[in-house]
Image: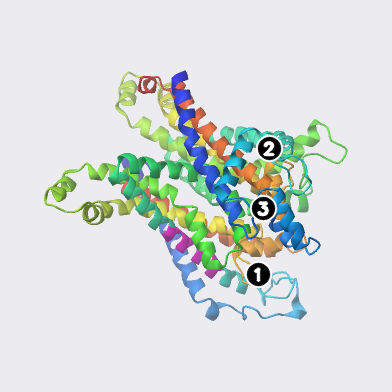
Amino acid sequence: MSTSTSASGRSTVQTNRAPRVAAYLLGALLLGAMLAPALAPFAVDALDLANRRAAPSSLHWFGTDELGRDVMTRVLFGARVSLAIGLVSALVSAAIGAAVGATAGYAGRVIDDILMRITDAMLAIPRLPLLMITAAVLQPSVPVLVLLVGLAGWMETARVVRAEVLSLAARDFVAAARAMGASPFRVVLRHVLPGVIPAAAVATTLAVGRGILLESALSFFGVGVQPPTASWGNMLYQAQTTMTSEPWLAIFPGAMIFLTVLACNAVGDAIGAARG
Amino acid sequence: MIRFVVRRLVQSVPLLLVISLLIFALIHAAPGGPLSTYLENPNVRPEDIERLRKAMGLDRPLGLQYLSWLWAFVRGDWGFSYADGRPVLDRLVERIPATLELIGVACVMALIAALPAGILAAVNRRFDRVSSVFAVAGISLPVFWFGLLLQLVFAGALGWLPSSGRASFDGGDFVDRVVHLILPATVLAAALSAAWSRYLRRAMRDTVARPFIRAARSRGLSERTLLLHHALPNALPTFVTVVLLDISMMASGAVVTESIFAWPGIGSLFTEALGKRDYAVLMAFLMCGSVAVMVLNLVADLAVHTLDPRTRDAA
C-alpha cells in the first residue's frame, strides 16, 4: 500500500456507504456461519431422496444436489469452513509477515538481505500452482490447509511491515527509547510495531479475501477441503460436471465466494484510503 | 545499462537456487517421493520399486540428489514425464504457443479497458464511483466461477460461443480460433483490467496532485493536454511496472482458466500433471514460472529506465 492519498480520497470514505455495507455484510456472514446449525433449514447431512437435483423452490431455496441435500444448508455450513480458512490463514500470514518484516526492517544489513531474498523467492514461485502441488502431496486436513494457505501469503505483509518499520525506526521517539536503554526486542515490540498495525491491518484484510479465494481454488481442483465436509470451493468442484443441467449447484456457492471476497476487499480498501 | 542487466542477472542466481531448493524439497516430501505413483499401483511389486529407486539414484543422500538434479536441469535435461515417457522439455515447449496466445490477447483486452478507465477515474468523480465498483468486483471475482458462468450463459443457454478448446476438431480457420479465444481471454482479462485501472487511477491521482501540474494549468494548458502529455508520462513508469509484474503472475491465472476452458496450454498441462502426480513436469512448471517472474521483473526495471530518465543515473 502506498502511503499517499489525496485529500479527496479521504472524503470519499466518509461519504461513501459501500465500505460500511461491506462491513455489515461480513458481520452477517460471520454470524450466519456461527449460527449455521440453528439457521440452516435442514440438518447438514439430511437427504431428501424424493427431491434430488431439485431446482430452487420455496422448500429448498437454493435447490438440492444429487443426493437430495439442501444446498442452502450446505452453503451455510460451507461458510464456516471457508470463512475460518480465510480468517485464520490471514492471521497466520500476518504473524509470519510481521515477524519477518519487523526483523528485516529493524535488524538491517545481512539479516535484511537474507530475509528479503527469501521473500522475493517466495513471491516469484507461482502461488496457486505451488499450493496445489503441496496440497496434492500432503493431502492436508482443514487445519493443515489453513497453515498452508497462511504460509503462502505472508510475503506481502512482510514487505509492507518492513517498509513501515524502516520509516518508523528513523524517527526520534525510537532513538529516544534506544537512548533510554531499551533492548532492540523491546524497541521493536513496544515502540515500532504498534505504529505498523494500521498498514498491517490493511494487508491482513486483503489476505482474508485472498485466503478464501485460494482455498476455493484448491478445493475447486479437488486438492483442498475434501467431501463430505462442505466448503464453497468443493461445492463448486462437485457442481462443475452438471453445470448445464443443475446450474444452481454452482451459482450459489460461487456467489458466496464472490460476495465475501468483495466485502473483504472493499473494507480493506476503505481502511487503506482512510489512513491516507 | 548492460552493467545493470548483468548485475541483476547475477543477483537472480542465488534467488533461483533458493527457489529450486524449495521446490526440490517439496517434491521429496511426498510420501514415496517421485516414485509415489508406483507405490499406489498394485501391479508394481516392492522389489521393482527398490530396483527403480536404485536405478534412478533415489537411494543416494538427498544433497547429492539435489546437486545432480540441478546440474541436469541447468543443462536442459529436465527428465521424462511419468505420464507418457516423453522428455519434459518437449511437452512444455509444445504447449507454450497456446498459452502465449491466450495471455497476449487477454493483456491487450485488459489494457484497452484499463487505460481509458484509469485515466478517467482519476479526474472524474462520478465515473470514479462507478468504475471503482466494477474494479473491486473484478478483483474479487473467483476466476473459476466466472469462467463457469460465462460457459453457462454464452456456450450453454445462448449457444453463441464454443465452451472449450482452441479450435474445432477439423483444425478451424481464423474466425473459428478467434471465437474459441473470446471466453477464456475475457475471463483472464476481467481481473487484469480491474487491477490495472486501479493502479493507473492511483498513479494518475498522485501525479495530478503534484505542483508541476498546477503550474502547467496556470499557464493555461487545456485539461486534455495536461492529462495526456504532462500527467500520463509521469504516471506511466509506476503503471508499467505493476502491469509487467502482474503479467508475470499469470502462471496461476493460466492454470485456472486453461483447465476450465480445456485450453491446450501449459496451464492445463500443469493440471493434467497434477492429477497424475507427474512430478518431473510439475517441477519444471514451477521453475519456468519462477524464471518468468524474474525475467519480467527485470524487464519492468528496464522499462522504467527507458520511460523515466531520472532513474538512469541511479543505476
Q: Quadrant of residue A204?
A: bottom left
Q: Residue at x 43, y 26 (%)?
A: B227
Residue A97 in the figure: left or right of residue A211: left
Q: Residue at x 58, y 32 (%)?
A: B112
Is residue A89 one of those drawn in magenta? yes
Foreground mark, 3 or 1?
A: 3
- Residue on which the image places disc 1: A227
Query: Few, some or many C-alpha atoms within 10 Å of disc 1 (few <14, some 14-19, many ≥20)?
Result: few
Residue A31 is at least partly visible in this image:
yes
Residue A15's disc is: none
**x, y (%) of residue A195?**
26, 51
Q: Is residue B300 above or below residue A172?
A: above
- Residue on which the image places disc 3: B34
Element type at mark 3: helix
Query: Few, some or many C-alpha atoms within 10 Å of disc 2 (few <14, some 14-19, many ≥20)?
Result: many
Element type at mark 1: loop
Query: Few, some or many C-alpha atoms within 10 Å of disc 3 (few <14, some 14-19, many ≥20)?
Result: many
Q: Quadrant of residue A49?
A: bottom right
Residue A11 is at least partly visible in this image:
no
**x, y (%) of residue B256?**
65, 49
Element type at mark 2: helix
Give the mark nearest the N terminus, 2 or 3. 3
Q: Nearer the viewer, residue A248 or A34?
A: A34
- Residue on which the image places disc 2: B99
Q: Residue at x 33, y 32 (%)?
A: B209
- Separation of disc 3 and disc 1 at Cα? 27 Å
Q: Nearer the viewer, residue A18 or B199?
A: B199
Range covered by the magenta-colored residues: A79-92
**x, y (%) of residue B198?**
47, 40
Q: Is residue A91 above or below residue B290?
A: below
